[in-house]
Image: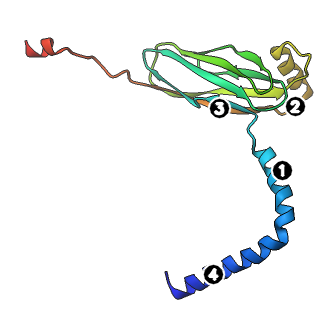
């Protein structure tokens, strides 16, 4: 690092210290707003599903981190994958299980889309909630689950077969 670089860094540090004192009350309000906005309403754990080309099953936990009821619609455009359930309602601060099944087929990568919307306390049908949101032209938020299928490792041989 050269002397000029050191001087620039020192100047930045001193300027930020002066600015921090003036902005301290504003930062508290901004930090609270940013922390609320940065909260993710729905998460899926794990975020990806790995399968062999022979097929398989992957289980995921879907968590609602909000204080509101959320309706979810899960879909995948590839016929090799099946999701259960396709629609669900998750209560505030609760979780539900999602199962993704893969049929035998060629090696490929795909994705499952998890759409979510906030619903009323008395709503009982997630499918109807999505139909109403589509009809109203509501923009529906979503997250993706990466679906990866790879080779199953090939034939395995026992030691006895190799020795003969």
The residue that disc 2 covers is 138
- Using the image as rendered, state which of residue 137 and residue 14 is in the foreground: 14
Looking at the figure, which quarter contains the C terminus?
top left
The reply to whether dot 1 and dot 3 touch (C-beta < 8 Å) is: no
Q: Residue at x 77, y 77 (%)?
A: 18
Q: Are marks 4 and 3 in contact (CB under 8 Å)?
A: no
- Nearer the viewer's eye, disc 4 or disc 2? 4
69 displayed left or right of 97: right
Residue tagged 1: 33
Work out whether 87 lies above or below 15: above
The quadrant in which residue 75 appears is top right
Dot 3, how many residues are within 10 Å of its Cα: few (below 14), some (14-19), or many (20+)? some
Question: Please, what secondary structure does the residue beneath circle 1 have?
Answer: helix
Say which quarter of the image contains residue 87: top right
Indicate the secondary structure of the residue bearing disc 3: strand
Locate residue 102, reporting x and y percent.
Answer: 52, 16
Counting residues from the N terminus, which is met first, the one under dot 4 or under dot 2?
A: 4
- According to the picture, the residue beneath numbered tag 3 turns out to be 144
Circles 2 and 3 in contact, beta carbons < 8 Å: no
Relative to 109, residue 152 above or below: above
Mark 4 packing: few (<14 Cα in 10 Å), some, or many (20+)?
Answer: few
- The percent position of residue 54, horizontal first and vertical second, equals 42, 15
For the point 73% across and 79% down, which residue is it?
A: 15
Is residue 158 left or right of 32 when viewed as pictured? left
Q: Residues within 10 Å of mark 1 (few under 14, many from 20)?
A: few
Distance Cα–Cα, label 4 vs label 3 = 44 Å
Which numbered disc, 1 or 3, marks the residue closer to the eye? 1
Mark 4 = which residue?
10
């Amino acid at each position: 690092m050269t002397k000029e670089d050191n001087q620039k860094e020192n100047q930045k540090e001193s300027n930020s210290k002066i600015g921090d004192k003036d902005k301290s009350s504003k930062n508290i309000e901004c930090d609270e707003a940013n922390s609320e906005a940065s909260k993710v309403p729905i998460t899926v754990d794990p975020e990806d599903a790995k399968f062999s080309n022979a097929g398989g099953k992957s289980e995921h936990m879907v968590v609602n981190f909000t204080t509101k009821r959320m309706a979810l619609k899960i879909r995948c455009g590839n016929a090799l994958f099946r999701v259960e359930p396709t629609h669900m309602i998750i209560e505030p601060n609760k979780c539900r299980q999602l199962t993704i099944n893969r049929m035998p087929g060629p090696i490929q990568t795909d994705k499952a889309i998890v759409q979510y919307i906030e619903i009323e306390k008395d709503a009982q049908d997630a499918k109807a909630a999505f139909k109403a949101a589509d009809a109203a032209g509501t923009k529906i938020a979503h997250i993706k689950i990466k679906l990866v299928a790879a080779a199953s490792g090939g034939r395995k041989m026992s030691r006895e077969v190799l020795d003969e």
